[in-house]
Image (cartoon, grey):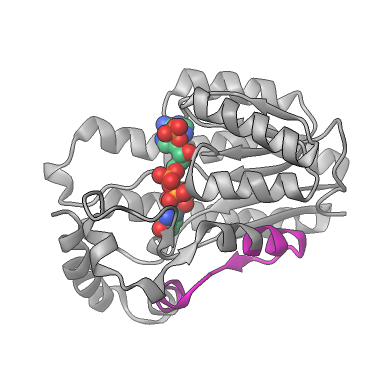
Amino acid sequence: MGIPEPSSSARAVVTGASSGIGAALATELARRGHSLILVARREGILQATATELAQEFGVEVEVMATDLSDSAATTALCEQLAGREISILCNNAGIATFGALVELDAEYERAQVRLNTVAVHDLTLAVLPRMVERGSGGILMVGSAAGNMPIPHNATYAASKAFVNTFSESLRGEVSGQGVHVTLLAPGPVRTHTPSPEEASTVDRVVPDFLWNSSEYVAKLSLDALERNKMRVVPGMLSKAMSVGGGYIPRKFTAPIVGTFYRKFGD
Ligand SMILES: NC(=O)c1ccc[n+]([C@@H]2O[C@H](COP(=O)([O-])OP(=O)(O)OC[C@H]3O[C@@H](n4cnc5c(N)ncnc54)[C@H](OP(=O)(O)O)[C@@H]3O)[C@@H](O)[C@H]2O)c1
């Protein structure tokens, strides 16, 4: 059956809904009539978004503020979601670090693994059984083009997104006959807001404007793809090049080239 029609009892869950791609996914889901559960740490922003979306689109919006890098908090959220009718899960929340692993903050790297991989796994395990039981539902996994190849100076992030990419495409093969859609979004650079000259990062400065996609465009593309149960959404030229490069060029060649580029992002 796939993605069920919106209903007042069902909820679409979006993690990382307080900014960027997650906020755009929440808005697009509300526009399509889905009632929502918004997850991230910044409760105030989520509450304000919930009020706006409920007013504009007439949907129910709940807020479940959670630090998904905290195992106990994630377990508590999963227990709540396991008992609810979840029609769609957007596993979107994620963070990235750039630089040599040995020089990065070890605790933040560990938190990145828990957020980018363990929480994605836990949330999926929480909602999947009832989706399979009902024979309907959709899971959008937000991986990355960075998960297609080894990337020195982005090691934890690239490895965490390799997990998401492979998890998504593997799980899809298990549940597609049971009415549950699983789609991977593996983007390259997505402009989540226009940075001021002071806040522009090296990534903003090094990657030219034409290679960026907007979060609104990526959200629409991803939800259309989830409805059609597409395996992978790869928006934009750079992410397509990284997908092809990661799939066909031997890793011993891509790793040093990409690593030289990413070294600049750690500055
Ligand atoms: N933008 C890109 O160029 C790009 C490219 C490829 C892949 N992606 C992936 O797309 C996803 C969204 O990225 P984005 O660019 O939209 O990022 P963003 O604007 O920085 O948003 C990240 C979201 O994750 C939430 N988050 C961060 N740490 C969290 C935690 N410990 N617990 C719960 N929520 C947490 C943040 O909310 P709080 O701070 O309120 O918790 C925020 O809502 C990520 O998985 C990212 O890896 C992005």
Residue 213: x and y in percent read 48, 66
Nearest the viewer among 152 and 22 is: 22
Residue 52: x and y in percent read 66, 35
Residue 178: x and y in percent read 82, 52
| Overall secondary structure of the magenta section | helix
- Which quadrant would the N terminus be assigned to in this image? bottom right
Residue 144: x and y in percent read 45, 59
Q: Which residues are magenta?
A: 221-243
Q: Where 43 falls versus 94 (above or below)?
A: above
Residue lying at 31% horizontally and 73% vertically, measured from the top left: 208
Q: Where 140 falls versus 243 (above or below)?
A: above
Q: Is residue 224 magenta?
A: yes
Nearest the viewer among 110 and 223 is: 223
Residue lying at 85% horizontally and 48% vertically, measured from the top left: 4
Q: In this rendering, would 231 be left or right of 109?
A: right
Q: Where 109 falls versus 47 (above or below)?
A: below
